[in-house]
Amino acid sequence: MKNRKYYEQIFNKYPDVVTLSQFRNMLGGIGDGTARKLMRENRVKHYYIRCTYLIPKAWVIDYVLSDHYAEYKDQLKAQV
């Protein structure tokens, strides 16, 4: 089973706060619409400042460890 330490290691090349584009890459290249839907539904904690999504890396890790991601990842074309 993958844990926080595993994701901290594979995401270590990303900055502490990522953009929507970086977030999409972190989740294996998910589409822009899918990423924005996750934000709109508040599945991933984030900041929305001046039309820009900013997501702390720790919150991305929280999401990939969440029950929602565990269920949802099977529907995604791309995965971590």
Image: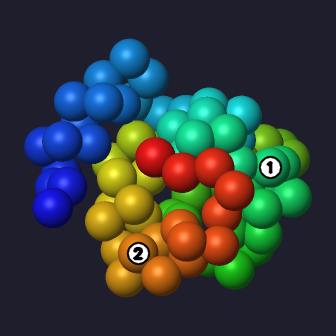
**In which quadrant is the N terminus drawn?**
bottom left
Q: Residues within 10 Å of mark 1 (few under 14, many from 20)?
A: some
Q: Which residue is mark 2?
A: 70
**In this orientation, which residue lies closer to the viewer: 26 or 1?**
1
Task: Say whether marks 2 and 1 touch (CB < 8 Å).
Answer: no
**In this orientation, which residue lies closer to the viewer: 59 or 70?**
70
Q: Which of disc 1 and disc 2 is earlier in sequence?
A: 1
Query: On screen, 6 above or below 38?
Result: above
Q: Residues within 10 Å of mark 2 (few under 14, many from 20)?
A: few
Query: On screen, 37 above or below 46?
Result: below
Residue type for callout 1: Gly
Q: How many marks?
A: 2
Q: Distance of mark 2 from mark 1, alpha carbons?
A: 18 Å
- In the rendered image, residue 30, in percent from the top left (x then y), is placed at 70, 49
Residue type for callout 2: Ala
Q: Which residue is mark 1?
A: 31
